[in-house]
Image (cartoon, rainbow, N blue to C red):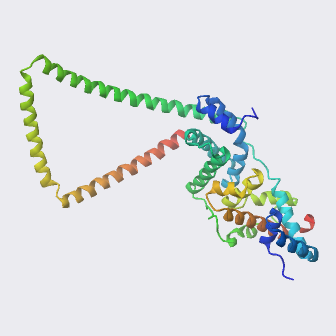
Amino acid sequence: MKNISDLEIIESVKKGNRADYSILVDRYKNKAFSLIVRMVKNQMDAEEVLQDCFVKAYNSLESFKQQAKFSTWFYRIVYNTALTRLSTKKRKVENDMSSIDELYFLESNYNPETTEQKDSSQFMQSMIEKLPPSYSAVINMFYLDNMSCEEISEIMQTSVSNVKVMLHRSRILLRDILIKNNYAEEIL
Amino acid sequence: MIPIDDETLNQYIDGELDQSKLNIVKEQLINSEIDRKRLEYLQKVHGDLGQLKIYQTSANFTSFVMSKLEKKLKSSKKDKIFILSISSVFMIFCLAIAGYLLFNIISDPSSTGLIVEKTNLYMSILMQFTESAKEIFTPQNISIFGSIISFGFLAVAYFMYEEHKFSKRKIEQ
């Protein structure tokens, strides 16, 4: 099963083997779920959004052009559906190219005294969860899904340079938070 | 010595610097401890980000998605059958009327003249109606009618949208 390509599965589903779609679901569910959790910041909502994404993708399989990668096409659905969920819930959706000052709310929000002491890696994981949706989406796709900036830009429908800016800003921000919270000694 | 900016450090990590810039950065890193530390912090962040946690969906997620798809397909099939049956009934009704008229014409040749007469009568009624419609639908009246109808459509669309949202919520619950 693992050796079957996405395109072969899609062809099979189009031919009427509906059950084969479950292979695609199994293949992408956890990574897509991680992306949505990091965007909507809630696992219950994320699972609902992911279900919608798979249903939407199934209904649009006919319009899927086989020149593109299925993962890119599917992640675009995931990203847009997560954004829609955020906007319907009237949560704050960060502008892709928002000012760096806006990102620094994380620093001001973090209070080391009220947070249990963690090692730097655990601490960073918790800070990533607090990044604005578009930034955490970039981080997730770049590091977890090993996507290139070009692919990410295609999914987010923004320029490659914007993606790079978001990626670099996130790294710098996380580094500065680490230093400010005295994790510098641990790092070195 | 001017410190290396963060953007350059990020490009260094991503391997995006050209050879000449790379040499300058490498040299500066040898000579500046501050820059070296800044790079090490950034590399640590880069390394930790590479170990991002993968969240797991619930155990029965796939089967739930597949059953949801099954349900949707069944309901769309039902919709298709409903539309098909309604249109079939309508078609049969039309065919029955057409058949009845044809049967009358064929069975009674004298009725052809009557049909022509009746057609002329209906045409004259239609002409009269058109004439009176011309008086009613002046440019001024059209804009008033248009506004009223548009308002009506908007109101209906709004209530339909609300009703759709309500029923969707109900189904999801």
**For this view, does A127 lie left or right of residue B100?**
right
**For this view, does A30 lie left or right of residue B88?**
right
The residue sitting at the front extreme is: B20
Q: Quadrant of residue A27?
A: top right
Q: Quadrant of residue A23?
A: top right
Q: Position of residue A24 (x, y in %)?
A: 68, 37
Q: How many marks?
A: 0
Q: Which quarter of the image is occupied by the C terminus of chain B?
A: top right
Name the residue at 58% across, 34% down.
B69
**For this view, does B105 lie left or right of residue A128?**
left
Name the residue at 70% across, 42% down.
A29
Which sits in the foreground, B113 or B168? Answer: B113
Q: Position of residue A79 (x, y in %)?
A: 63, 52
Which sits in the foreground, B20 or B118? Answer: B20
Q: Position of residue A74 (x, y in %)?
A: 64, 46
**Position of A85 relative to B84 (above/below):** below
Name the residue at 66% across, 59% down.
A134
The residue sitting at the bottom extreme is: B1
Q: Which quarter of the image is occupied by the N terminus of chain B?
A: bottom right
- Residue A177 in view of the camera: no
Q: Position of residue B36 (x, y in %)?
A: 90, 72
**Position of A38 relative to B15 (above/below):** above
